[in-house]
Amino acid sequence: MAGSLPEAATPVWRRGAEVFDFAARGATITERFAATAKAAAASIAIVQGAQAASYAELDRRSNRLARYLQRCGVSAGDVVALRAGRSIRSLTAMLATLKLGAAYAPLDPAAPADYQAWQLQDCGARIVLVTGCGTRDLPVATFDLDEALAACEAEDDWALENVCRPEDIAYVMYTSGSTGRPKGVRVPHRGVVRLVADQTYARFAADEVLLHAAPLSFDASTFEIWGTLLHGARGVIVKDDRSSLHDLADTIARNAVTTAWFTAGLFHLLVEHQLDALKGLRQLLAGGDVLSPTSVLRAQMALPDCQIINGYGPTENTTFTCCYRVPAEGWGGGPVPIGTPINGTYVRLLDDAMNPVPDGKIGMLYTGGLGLASGYIGDACQSAASFVADPEQPGAVLYRTGDLARRRPDGALDFFGRRDRQVKIDGKRIEPGEIEEALRHDSCIADAVVTAARNSAGAPVLTAYLKPAAGAVDRATFASTARERLRGALPPHLQPSRFVVLDEFPLKPNGKVDYDRLPTPRVLPDASLASGSGDTEQKLLDIFSRLLGVKAVGSAANFFDLGATSLKLVEAHAAIEQLWPGTGVVALFRHPNVRELAQAIDGRGDDLKTAAQRRAQQQAAALRNIQRARSAR
């Protein structure tokens, strides 16, 4: 099988912290990249549409930008925030930051300004580099990344002296926090190098072509970026987060991508709708949630030359903790295992008293080794609660994942869910407590409870239960008003789809909320709009009713208010394009309800065209210009 790797001499799940003394311990991202850029200077490092940058170009550009940032006051130990999407310029900024001994902190560009401002203050960012609009009113010095790259052209491009150590912080990445605020995870250089160096869970080499599809603020991007740049491989940047399944498949095929990581949800959609487009892959990694055994088996049958890998791990242990290379002969039925610890990592399954549980019994999963983060920025109490002493290894530290697992006879781990209320939606970690705390900041809300239950389509849906404060008026619009205010406080992936107003929450005898007795939310669209006013509208209503698990979808109801996520709209687009070929996925975001989308489809606006159609039109226009130029001679 393509990409096969030698088995480790010692069963990795039996190893302890003392055995990890491989090359990654003495290396940093900057040292590894410098060696790679020298060895592969002329090789293409990154492709972004029609743009490309070689390793030498990326190295020189980041050297110039580093000197410019140095003139702006950035030095070793600082944090440079980056509010930008995937691009060659963003990777240049990351490298420049690291070369100064500073850490980068990627922010979600779609998050509200106040949310971003809090993150900037929390991580103590020296500056923030931004792209696009909305650069004002941030609490730290703000620089437009394009302007900075233009301004640094006069700077020297020779190499800077390496000032990084393995324990220095490489980046700060925010995850949802149960205390009401996101947690800034401090990931050191050694964690990143351990993720992609001397590994056996996947093949890293100069002849690999890696897809870059994860948002920079999502830790899977660490695997994509540094799995590319520390090995002389080629990275292919997916244009934006609103690409259709067809556009994504087209990017993979046109660029001969060999290695790709997908969230579990996206993997399932690709298997269902674009499986043939994945036939060029040698390695397909998926994770962030439980994988469907049926989808894995379908992929195995259709992709015999591709190694499928189930990846598991929290941000606090640098992206991957365990991986399972699915054998060609299968895994014996049941859920797909999360596998064994990757090199540089070990795990322990412990009971409530921190004692080991026997093989075959369920225990709390703790992990240690070189991938461990250095705690949470500015939160010593939470760090102490999550990063605890290893009872079996004096001086070693373990991260308490909160996940339950069981060891199989072959040493692989089976995942058994969470011990707490944390959930994952589209691969993103969500703490209901963070949403509850944001709601309680609303003076009109006395209390709030947020749950995540699966709808009839099997997808998790966030529901907010609200208790109005005394004197709150206009109960008819209470929920919609609360929804609007929350949109200004939290990023899109933390927005509940359904809001339920209750006078009191059901309680257990001990006074705690009885989640089992909370009423099932009902979606009550405008009755006059429950059926479509035309053929297009009715067909769209049927599609969204099926995909969102909602019996009656109002034509004017916002897709996101009904439980849709960005990934769910991509799935809807696959069904819509079968009925109306040429409809671009961006149309679903620009027209976020059935009525507007139906009107746009019937009117056939330019925004409905797919990327492939627009490309074909551009190529045709370019050809006409060439022909005109020749005729004019």
Image (cartoon, rainbow, N blue to C red):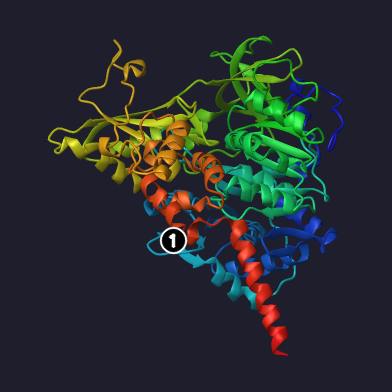
Q: In this orientation, which residue lies closer to the viewer: 155 or 338?
A: 338
Q: In this orientation, which residue lies closer to the viewer: 149 or 139?
A: 149
- The residue at 15%/36% (across/down) is 472
Residue 566 image offset from top left, x and y in percent: 49, 43
Quadrant location of residue 473?
top left
Number of marks: 1
428 vs 368: above or below: below
Look at the image and tell me in which quarter the N terminus lies: top right
Q: Residues within 10 Å of mark 1 (few under 14, many from 20)?
A: some
Judge from the rendering whether residue 521 lies leftward or rightward of residue 161; answer left or right: left
Residue 354 image offset from top left, x and y in percent: 58, 16
Residue 385 image offset from top left, x and y in percent: 50, 28
Look at the image and tell me in which quarter the C terminus lies: bottom right
Quadrant location of residue 463?
top left
Q: In this orientation, which residue lies closer to the viewer: 533 or 95?
A: 533
- The residue at 67%/82% (across/down) is 628
Instruction: Evaluate whether residue 396 shows in this view.
Output: no
Q: What element does badge 1 sit on?
A: loop
Residue position marked by numbered label 1 in the rendering: 140
179 vs 10: above or below: below
- The residue at 59%/49% (across/down) is 171
Instruction: Evaluate whether residue 308 shows in this view.
Output: yes
* Residue at the limit of the structure toward the front, as seen here: 535
